[in-house]
Image (cartoon, coloured by chain):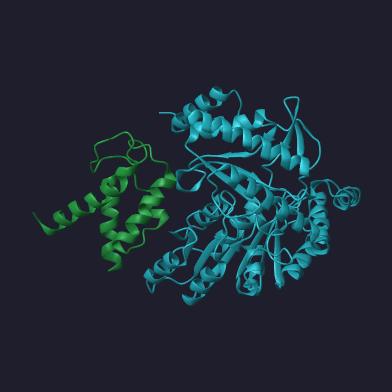
Chain colours: A green, B cyan
Amino acid sequence: MSSIQEDDDLVFRKIASLIEPLNEKGVKLTRDTDLIADLEIDSVAVLDVVMDIEDSYDISIPVNTISEIKTIGELVDAIHAIKKEQS
Amino acid sequence: MSLFDKFQTTATQYKALREGIGRDPFGVSMDEMKGPTRAMVNGKEIVLAGTNNYLGLTYDDRAIAAAKDAIDQSGTGTTGSRFANGTYAAHRQLEIDLAAFLGFKHCMVFSTGYQANLGAISALAAPPEDVILLDADCHACIYDGAQLSGAEIIRFRHNDPESLDKRLGRLGDKVKGKLVCFEGMYSMFGDIAPVKELIDVAHKHGAYALLDEAHSFGVFGDNGRGVCEAEGVLDDVDFYTGTFSKSLASIGGFVASNHPELEYLRFSSRPYMFTASPSPANVATASAALARLKSDPSMRENLWQNAKRVHAAFTQLGFDLCAPESPVIAARLEGREQAFMAWNFLMENGVYVNLAIPPGTPNATSILRLSVSAAHTNEDLDAIINAYTALSEMLSAQAA
C-alpha cells in the first residue's frame, strides 16, 4: 500500500468518525456517500463537521470549496489538496 | 429532472409538520394590529413576543407625525436608487445624525439591514487576494454578502477568539485584505459576542473588524450604541453595521466607519447602487426614532426590566434557555416536532413567538425564540409567563 493510499484511508476514517454521530439513518459510509442526499445532513451541519476537520488537521477549508463538495471522497481529496498547499 | 426537485424533501417535511398542528408557523398573518404588542390573528387577540420591536417604538407619536409630514412633503417613494435620483436631503441628514450618534466620521444608509451587510461586505472584499472570516453563527446577510463578494470565506467557531486567531494565523502571504465579520448580540439565541477579544485578534493580524449590531443597537451600552459601547471598544470597530427595522421601528440599514474609504462604496456596492432608496416615510421614522432613542433612556430601562422578569420566570419554570439575560430569550426543545407542537400551544394560549428550526439555527437546535419589548405591559408579560407555565406543565405531563 502506498503512503498516499494509507494517508487517504486515515483521512477517510477521521471524517467518517466525525460524521458518524450525524448518521441517523445508519448509512454505510464510503467515498461515494453523498453528505446531503444520502445522509440528509443539513448544509450548516456539513459546515460544522468541516470545522472539526479543520481543527484536526490545522488547515482552513474555505466555505467556497465546501459548497462544491458532495461526497466524502471529494472531501478527502480537498483535504489532501489543501494540506499540500498550506504545508 | 425538474427545477423543483430540490425543494421536495423540505416541502414534504414542512407540510407534514404544518398539517400536524393545523397552522403555519412561517406564514402567520397579523390580520389587524392593535398596538406595538398586540394583534388580531384568526379573530383572536394575541400578545406579540416575536417582533424585534425592542424599544416598542412602532406607534411612537412623533415618529408617526414625522412619517406623515414626510409623505406630504416628499411623496410616497423615491422611485430611484441612492446612486441615481434616490438621494434626498433626509437620507444625508440621517447619515450625519447616525454618524454623530455613534461617533464615526462616515455613514451610508441602505434600503434594508440585509442590504447594508450585503452591500458592505460584497464591496469591501474581492477575489482573488482578499479573505473574509465570519463567525459560524452569523446571520444569512453576512454569509450572502460574503458569497456575493466572490472572495474566499472561512468560518471560525462561534464567539471563539482563539479559533479566529488560528484561522488568521494560517493565512498565507498571498492574502491581501482580511475582513472579520461578527455580531454584537446574536438574533436566534440572544448571546453576546466577546467583541473586544475578537477585535484585538483581528487587528493583531492586520484584519479589519466588521461588527453587526442589528439586534443590539438601542439595546446595549449606556447610550444604546450597542455591545461595543458596553464593552468600551466602539472606537476600535472598523465597520459598524445596523438596521432601522428593530429598535428604530422603520425599514432600512446603515454602515458607519472612520475609514474615509467607506465613501467609495457609494460607487462600488451593488446592493446600494441598484435598488431604490428608503422611502421618505421610512427615513423620517428612523430619524424620529433615533432622536427619541438619544433623549429617552427610559425605554431601554423598561426593556431590560421586562427581559429580566421573563428570563427569571422561564429559568424558574425549568426551560433550557440558550443564553444569559438579554431581550432575546430562546428556549431549546427536543426536536422539530416538539418545537412545532409547543409553538402552536403558545398560539392557542394567545402568545406569538418565533419558531426556529435547523438549518436556521446553530447546532441543529429547535427553539422557541421570544423577543421582549419595552412596550410590553405587565399584563402582556403576565400573559406570556402564564402561557409558558402551561406549556411547561404540558411538556412535563407528556414526558411522564
**Along the viewing direction, whichever of B187 and B243 lies nearer the viewer:** B187
User: How far from the left and from the top, in percent, is residue B127?
Assistant: 46, 63
Which quadrant holds residue A37? Answer: top left
| Rendered location of residue B270, percent (x, y) | 61, 56
Instruction: Give the vertical position of A34 relative to B288 (above or below).
Output: above
Residue drawn at the location 76% of the way across and 68% of the way down: B101
Q: In this rendering, does residue B88 appear at all? A: no
- In the rendered structure, the answer to whether residue B380 lies left or right of residue B314 reads right
> x, y percentage for residue B306?
72, 50
| Relative depth, front residue between B264 and B398 | B398
> Is B175 rendered above or below residue A2?
below
Quadrant in which the N terminus of chain B appears: top left
The residue at the point 76 percent across, 24 percent down is: B43
Q: Nearer the viewer, residue B53 or A63?
A: B53
- Quick check: A19 left or right of B273? left
> x and y percent of residue B305 in the render?
72, 54
Can the viewer see residue B299 in this picture? yes
Number of residue marks: 0
